[in-house]
Amino acid sequence: AQTVTQSQPEMSVQEAETVTLSCTYDTSENNYYLFWYKQPPSRQMILVIRQEAYKQQNATENRFSVNFQKAAKSFSLKISDSQLGDTAMYFCAFTAVIETSGSRLTFGEGTQLTVNP
Amino acid sequence: DGGITQSPKYLFRKEGQNVTLSCEQNLNHDAMYWYRQDPGQGLRLIYYSQIVNDFQKGDIAEGYSVSREKKESFPLTVTSAQKNPTAFYLCASSIDSWTSGTYWGYNEQFFGPGTRLTVL
C-alpha cells in the first residue's frame, strides 16, 4: 500500500517571497508518478506539477518547482514569487504504474497556504 | 465545451435514505473515479472504473455503490449503510493509461466541480 504524508497543515508567506511545502511518501514500487494539486476556495482541483520517478531532473512549471529525492522518498514543492492567487489548499499525490490499479491517486492530507499582501 | 459535470452542487439527505450523485463527462475518457474529501484527510478513493461495465473498489468503498453502463456516466450511490456520509465528493476522469497490458504513460485526471452532501 502507498501512503502520502504532508506534515504542514497550514503555512503562510508574504507576497513575492518563496515558500516550500513538504511531502513524504512510502511505496515499494519503483515506477510511479508524483503530483502537486492546488485546490482554491472554489474547490476545483488543479494540477500544478508532476514528476516521473524515473527522471532524475526535477520538474519545473514557471514559478513552481519540485525537489524530488527518490531515496529519501521526499517530494517538496517550491513556489517562487508568491502571488495572492496562490492561496489555496495544496495536495501531494502519488500513483504507481500498476495495471490492476488503473491510474488511481493517493493523496496527502493537504497544506493550506495563505499568501499575505 | 468538453468537461466533467457533477450534480447537484449541494445535496441534503435524511438519515436512512439512499442518494445518488451524478457524474458526466464528454471528454471521451475511458477511466472514471470517485473521491471523498473530508477536512484534514485529503481525498480518498471510493471506486474507479477503467472501462464500461467494469469497476473496482477503492480504499473506502463500504456503504457506496456505483454503475458504469455508459462511457460518459459514472453515478455514485451513497447508501444508508454509509455511517458518516457528510462530505465533499469529487468525480474525475482520464484517458486510460493501459491498453492490452501496455502502459502508455500517465494521463492527467480531470476533476469535476464536486458535490457537497450533508446528512440531516
Image (tube, rainbow, N blue to C red):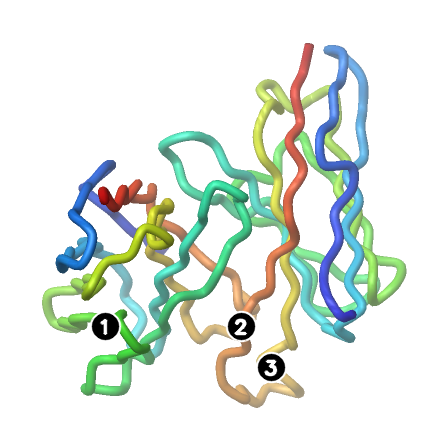
Question: SS of the residue at dot 2?
Answer: loop
The residue to which callout 1 is attached is A65
Identify the subunit bearing mark 2: B
Q: Are marks 3 and 2 in contact (CB under 8 Å)?
A: no
Using a 10 Å C-alpha cutoff, classify the residue at mark 2 as few (fewer than 14 neighbours), some (14 to 19) or many (20 or more).
some
Q: Chain of mark 1?
A: A
Whether callout 1 and callout 3 share a subunit is answered no
Q: Which mark is residue A57?
A: none
- The amino acid at mark 2 is Glu
**Of all residues shown, which one is farthest toward the left?**
A72
B6 displayed left or right of A32: right
Residue occupied by mark 2: B108
Residue in view at x 77 percent, y 51 percent: B23
Q: Residues within 10 Å of mark 3 (few under 14, many from 20)?
A: some
Seen as rendered, the residue at the extreme front is A117
Q: Locate residue A63, reporting x and y percent.
A: 26, 71
Give the secondary structure at mark 1: strand
Instruction: Report the residue marked by disc 3.
Output: B98
**Callouts 1 and 2 close, C-beta under 8 Å:** no
Number of dots carrying numbers: 3
